[in-house]
Each structure stands twice: as C-alpha cells, then as structure tokens.
Image (tube, rainbow, N blue to C red):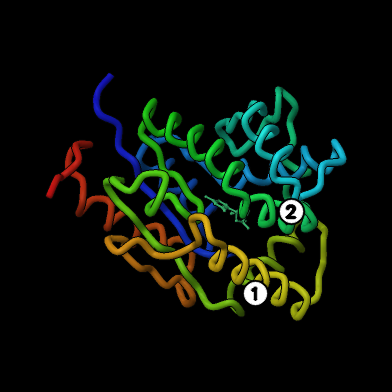
C-alpha cells in the first residue's frame, strides 16, 4: 500500500468540524473519521451497562474491548449495533466529554484512530488529532467560531432533529464542555503550533469548504505529501 495522507481537523464543540470534515473527505476521496463519535460510543455503552462516567478502570476496559466502526454516511456501529442516533443525545455529549478526560480511555481510542489512519487516507476530526494522534499529519486545521455562533448552529441542528432548546442553556453547555475539554490534564484541546487557524464565525459552509480545500491543495500535490 502507498503512503497514506492524514488531514487533521481540531476545534471546539459546534465549530462545524463534522460537516466540513465530511465534505472535505468527499471532495478528496478520503475516509472521514469522526473521533468524537468514538468517545460518545463509550459514554453510551457505559450508561447502558451502569458504569459511571468517572469509573476509570472499567471505562478503560470498555474502551479497549469495544468494537467501534465508523461507516460511510456517518453511521456508527458499536459491537455491530447501529448507535448513530443515540450518541447524539445531549446527555451523551456530556458523558463523552467526561469519559474523554480519562487517560486509559484516550489511550485505547487513540490506538484505534492511529490504526485507521495507517490503513487509508483520512480526514480525521476531534480535539487532539494534530497534537497527539497524528502530530505528523500532512495538513492540520484548527476550526473555530465564537461560542454564540456555535450555540446558534447547535440550536439549528437540534431544531432540525425536532429537539428545540433554549439559547442560554445550550450556550452554557457549550462553555462547560469547552472548559472541560481544554483544561483536562491529558491531551487538552489546543491548537497545534503548525495548525492553520480558521475562524468560521462569519462564513457559510461553502466558504469554509473552499478555504479548507485551498489549504489542503497548498500543502499537498497530486495526492503526494509536500514535505518540509
Ligand atoms: O466532537 P464531539 O462533540 O462529538 O466530541 C464529544 C466529546 O469527546 C467532546 O466533548 C470531547 C471529546 N473528544 C476528545 O476528547 N477527543 C477527540 N479527539 C474527540 C472528541
């Protein structure tokens, strides 16, 4: 197999990473890997099994033993079962943020992510892809937007799924997650020194897609990584 290319997209909750990473992967013909879905799968599995979201020992074991598959089209399978819908519940967002602070859980999932990136060219999105999972990624993007704009997008997304919510409540949930994700001891959310910062606050999805594609094309050529 030839050399694979990794595009890393990190940033806070609601910055548009999932939509843009999926679109970018489609344009490039790469696999799209949503690493947040993997932390969500562990949080859901723990809740079903009655394992506390702070039970480090059992969660680590669960993360090592769980078979998580990320299928084309965004479907997520846990040990063969489709959990795509359930992992998007607000309670599971909170649980994923909590289980993702546990080093043993991170270690198990990071190993799975690294394996996926070795097997194929990927656009991988999360919090620590450019800093920890693939520090040597060909292209690193840090996608950001103001908390208020991210709240508006999350509300729109929830409304689209028939789940109306309060602006102030969603904003405070986003801020609490930002705080936890960026202050945890292990692999906190932060911009890699060599990542390109993209502020999507006043851009629409098409504009962000074009901006990201331009960054990727500047750093790769004919599918080959431009080194140095
Ligand atoms: O991207 P998301 O909202 O689906 O992620 C859910 C949680 O998982 C988020 O609060 C932080 C955590 N996460 C992480 O710690 N590292 C990643 N690479 C991806 C997500």
Relative depth, front residue between 132 and 161: 132
Instruction: From this view, report whether residue 138 is shown above or below residue 184.
Output: above
Where residue 49 sits: x, y (%)?
85, 36
Displayed quadrant of residue 198: bottom left
Where residue 73 sits: x, y (%)?
58, 36
- Say left or right for 86 vs 220: right
Classify mark 2 as within 8 Å of ligand 1 or not, answering yes or no: no
Residue 175, labelled with which disc?
A: 1
Relative depth, front residue between 63 and 82: 63
- Say left or right for 175 vs 226: right
Residue beneath label 2, please? Answer: 95
- Say left or right for 108 vs 227: right
Residue 128, labelled with which disc?
A: none
Task: Return the disc, 1 or 2, that comes first in the chain's sequence.
Answer: 2
Where residue 42 sits: x, y (%)?
70, 40
Measure the alpha-carbon separation of dots 1 and 2.
15 Å
Q: Residue at x 46, y 53 (%)?
A: 128
Q: Residue at x 20, y 45 (%)?
A: 220
Q: Residue at x 19, y 37 (%)?
A: 224
């Amino acid at each position: 197999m030839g050399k694979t290319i990794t595009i890393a997209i990190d940033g806070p909750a609601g910055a548009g990473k999932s939509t843009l990473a999926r679109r970018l992967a489609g344009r490039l013909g790469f696999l799209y890997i949503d690493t947040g879905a993997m932390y969500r799968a562990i949080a859901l599995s723990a809740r079903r099994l009655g394992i506390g979201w702070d039970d480090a020992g059992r969660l680590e074991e669960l993360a090592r033993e769980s078979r998580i598959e990320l299928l084309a089209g965004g479907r997520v399978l846990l040990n063969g079962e489709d959990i795509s819908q359930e992992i998007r519940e607000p309670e599971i967002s909170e649980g994923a943020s909590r289980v993702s602070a546990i080093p043993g859980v991170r270690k198990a999932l990071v190993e799975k992510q690294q394996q996926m990136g070795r097997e194929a060219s990927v656009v991988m999105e999360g919090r620590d892809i450019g800093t920890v999972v693939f520090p040597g990624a060909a292209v690193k993007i840090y996608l950001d937007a103001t908390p208020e704009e991210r709240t508006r997008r999350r509300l729109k997304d929830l409304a689209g799924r028939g789940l109306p919510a309060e602006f102030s409540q969603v904003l405070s949930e986003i801020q609490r997650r930002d705080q936890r994700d960026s202050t945890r001891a292990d692999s906190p959310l932060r911009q890699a020194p060599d990542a390109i910062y993209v502020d999507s606050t006043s851009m629409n999805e098409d504009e962000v897609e074009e901006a990201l594609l331009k960054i990727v094309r500047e750093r790769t050529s004919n599918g080959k990584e431009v080194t140095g």
